[in-house]
Image (cartoon, helix red, strand yellow):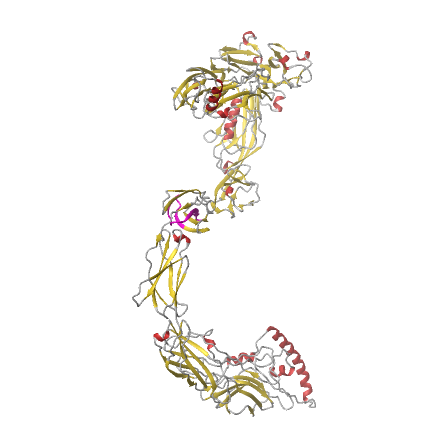
Amino acid sequence: MQLKIMMPKKKHLSAGRAPLILFLCQMISALEVPLDPKLLEDLVQPPTITQQSPKDYIIDPRENIVIQCEAKGKPPPSFSWTRNGTHFDIDKDPLVTMKSGSGTLTVNIMSEGKAETYEGVYQCTARNERGAAISNNIVIRPSRSPLWTKEKLERITLRNGQSLVLPCRPPVGLPPPIIFWMDNSFQRLPQSERVSQGLNGDLYFSNVLPEDTREDYICYARFNHTQTIQQKQPISVKVISVDELNDTIAANLSDTEFYGAKSHRERPPTFLTPEGNASRKEELRGNVLSLECIAEGLPTPIIYWIKEDGTLPINRTFYRNFKKTLQIVQVTEADSGNYQCIAKNALGAIHHIISVTVKAAPYWIIAPQNLVLSPGEDGTLICRANGNPKPRISWLLNGVLIEIAPDDPSRKIDGDTIIFSNVQERSSAVYQCNASNEYGYLLANAFVNVLAEPPRIFTSADTLYQVIANRPALLDCAFFGSPLPTIEWFKGAKGSALREDIYVLHENGTLEIPVAQKDSTGTYTCVARNKLGMAKNDIHLEIKDPTRIIKQPEYAVVQRGSTVSFECIVKHDHTLIPTVTWLKDHGELPSDGRFTVDKDHLVVADVSDDDGGTYTCVANTTLDSVSASAVLSVVDVPNPPFDLELTDQLDRSVQLSWTPGDDNNSPITKFIIEYEDAMHEPGLWHHQTEVPGAQTTAQLKLSPYVNYSFRVMAVNSLGRSLPSEASEQYLTKAAEPDKNPTAVEGLGSEPDNLVITWKPLNGFESNGPGLQYKVSWRQKDGDDEWTSMVVADVSKYIVSGTPTFVPYLIKVQALNDAGFAPEPAVVLGHSGEDLPMVAPGNVHVNVVNSTLAEVRWDPVPLKSIRGHLQGYRIYYWKAQSSSTRNRRHIEKKILTFQGSKTHGMLPGLEPFSHYTLNVRVVNGKGEGPASPDRVFNTPEGVPSAPSSLKIVNPTLDSLTLEWEPPSHPNGILTEYTLKYQPINSTHELGPLVDLKIPANKTRWTLKNLNFSTRYKFYFYAQTVAGSGSQITEEAITTMDEGKMAGILPPDVGAGKAMASRQVDIATQGWFIGLMCAVALLILILLIVCFIRRNKGGKYPVKEKEDAHADPEIQPMKEDDGTFGEYSDAEDHKPLKKGSRTPSDRTVKKEDSDDSLVDYGEGVNGQFNEDGSFIGQYSGKKEKEPAEGNESSEAPSPVNAMNSFV
């Protein structure tokens, strides 16, 4: 029975089946006893050679010789050597030493001795009590790098076109040298299809050229083993051209047939190597087959290769030396056959057949393997080899031919097989198998070790295996025993033997669970038994959740320079710690600070083109690995097109073609073509056309006499590329202009001229040199012929001596040296204008209301206008007020009405005023004479607010009011209206009292008022037209005759005032107690007022005032049905918070005069036909600023107290 040795496995098991396959392979190929330290203490093993020098060992003669021989066994083997078939006594040679515990020899030739002395065939033997193993025959030879023999080389002279072979013939070295050709400067000579180096080192010229002439063709031989280079003598080559040959012959020969010789004639190919029509080549199996054919001819031949009755192996065939050498690597017997090389040029072809035979040194089919048997078992050693010719098999026992070795009844030899039966311990030995033929030999050692050993398990006890769920679990039970133990597996303490219908039981003892589940977790027991005993071991298995990527990175498209982020979220078994690694294109991330990796993200900043690719997130645990990938496409605007080319160049068109640049991962949608006119507008590029992105040519329309250059830009979804390089320039032929100038006008600058202007053609539109203009004109209403004048490239022509403002027909035609443009269009113009001669007549004024008047007039005849009618202009001014009390002069105001209008409205007039106006017609030259002045008066209007209102002398029951009349009465004042009402402590308004006061009064006293009461007053003036704007005021009566009355505190509101008067009542006893309480109250109020003032709070009285404004006292308006009439009155603007009433208790109201400035700006004003204002006027606007001095004094205690009451 054959014993099998089981090797121990690693404790942690990978999740796949690959480890199982690897383990089984180890079991089959390594049948030696495991070198477990505990096992080796009492387990013997025959020697095994583990390391040896190569069979053909070429040494460096300058270094010590080291011949290796290492072996293992139990007990450790001893070593001996033979040299050239006889025992090599190491002890007798002082230069040779053997390494301790090893058979490796070291020959010390660096101190003395020569390497040649130790040339020979060496063999090592490793021996112990169980047998002897031998090494290969190791042939020791020192390397050699001999010099070239001295030789005198003559210059080689030949004609242009001849063939040439420069021989190298390097010295024979060991190993053979590497050949190459260089010059004196150690520069390799250039090689080509015409000039190349052969396998033998010679330099072949298929035909020579004059440039092949040189003095330094040098062949070098490099001996790699000794790292030396040997040099051949330089070869001089002179190639004589046709001219040189004729000159030479003419100078030296008077009459010869070579005189006037031509270059060497063209000829069909012939082979320089190999010679003849056929040759033979022999190569060994596994080597590189090199076949060479080099041909000469003119022109230079091309080489082709074919295999007769077969094809060249695709993956093993290579062409070298410009296809002059065919190489087949790892050649086999199947590569034998006829190979044909064909040399071909324009004048013919020639072929050569190379018959290839592949021989083979011996190679293993089945190499003998070590046997470990138990006593009484059977076994076989097989040594099977092949080769060409068939190798001979011979057996040795412990290094001795088996025919002369001691007999063993358990052994029987049958050719390449040794059969063992019923072996005993004495049958242990090392057998050698030698397979040899004329091309080499094979030598293999295989021992037979007869042992009797009880089972042993090498897998560590209580080994823990962790496996991912749903994957195979392999539980190791490496064992040894002789005879071979049987293996059983159990699960749990009381489990039965595991059956093979669920589990897989391997011969090496491994238990496989094909699909491990969570319930596979537990303790498994491996039991090994043979007739000599039993061994067991417990194995623990844990099943883990698989690692998964629950959020995978996603495909991303980003623009160059932006930032991209990939996300990778991993879920894993809680007992495992994953490591997440990012890869780019299956390699490490670039070591660049732009790449940032955190827990779940990879961020790439400032993305560049090189960052595009596949990014992979790899999550690894100790048990499994998962990955997910995403592609990053970096996009950008396209690269500029290039290789612009102009073809099909015609007078009016050309075809432009180009090569697109890289689209940077975003398809090109279109191309934009621009042109530059280097003749007329150099440096300025214009849009020519656009074509679709799939098109790379465009037919372009051209204009005459333009020096074109074109450039192209590519466009994709991200934008436009940079422009391409400009194309070559293309100047088109001149032609007559295609168009005439535009914007032709005829206008006179003086009464007796006609100025003709136009927009000239630009250089691009001129179509040729000598651009001019033919200007033509004639009167529209006459029978005159056209008058023409050709002018230079200008934009204006002046016709003098024309009648005033006469219509002319005008045309301007372009022309150049090639001819005229098409007939131009006729344009209507007029000669120069003059001032109108007649004023408008029948001017009438209709006063609409106090601020608006309508003016009407008769139109001026067109002939009297002497120009283009611009409109009519009204001058008007205020002479004096109707009231003799107010006289003042106002500047003239102007309103212009465009076109042929014969009426207009004058807004913004002052009521109760005396006005004068006149009307003038206006043309392009200016104004005509004025019409006779017309005078009109405006009726009365409502007055402005009284200029001021102040309250003086307050008492317990009376208040005196003083005021100034309105600054703009706008008529005769008829009376004043005074309305007032009390305000209680809660700021509620009392009943309103209405009082009429004569117009000639400026002071009024109100009596029978309530003491210590605040009153609000409303005061305004009236004319017959109605009531004017009001002015308001507030005041407080005194508490009694012994107390003061004061004005309102400053935060009551703007424009509010009070009178104050103090009476000393300190002699009254009841007042002393009251004042103590009041003092404290005043202090509190001062603090409150200070806080409220800082916060900017609004005094409540003002709120009440706004809420209870007298609805009866409103500014009056005149309703005359005209356009938006406006009022003189403006809203009363209060004084700033915190200000006190001036000492004179006067508050002035801002006034607003009616003014046309409110309707527009500038000097001229205009109206539509319906009278609505659309223009401007000139004049002055007067406004009287509000009077009254502001103060920031703090409020007095008395005022504060009174406001509190």
Image x and y of residue 175, in percent: 56, 18
Main SS of residues in magenta: strand
User: Residue 7, located in which quarter of the rendered image?
Assistant: top right
State whether residue 45 appears in this view. Answer: no
State whether residue 856 appears in this view. Answer: yes
Relative to 541, does residue 667 appear above or below in the rendering? below
Image x and y of residue 610, in percent: 51, 41
- Which of these two is toward me, 853 or 1186? 853
Image x and y of residue 70, in percent: 61, 19
User: Residue 264, located in which quarter of the rendered image?
Assistant: top left
Does the magenta portion include 715? yes
Does the magenta portion include 473? no
Relative to 798, does residue 539 appear above or below in the rendering? above
Query: Quick check: 1149 left or right of 671?
Result: right
Start and end of the magenta stretch?
Answer: 688-717
- Which of these two is toward me, 156 or 342? 156
- Which of these two is toward me, 628 or 528? 628
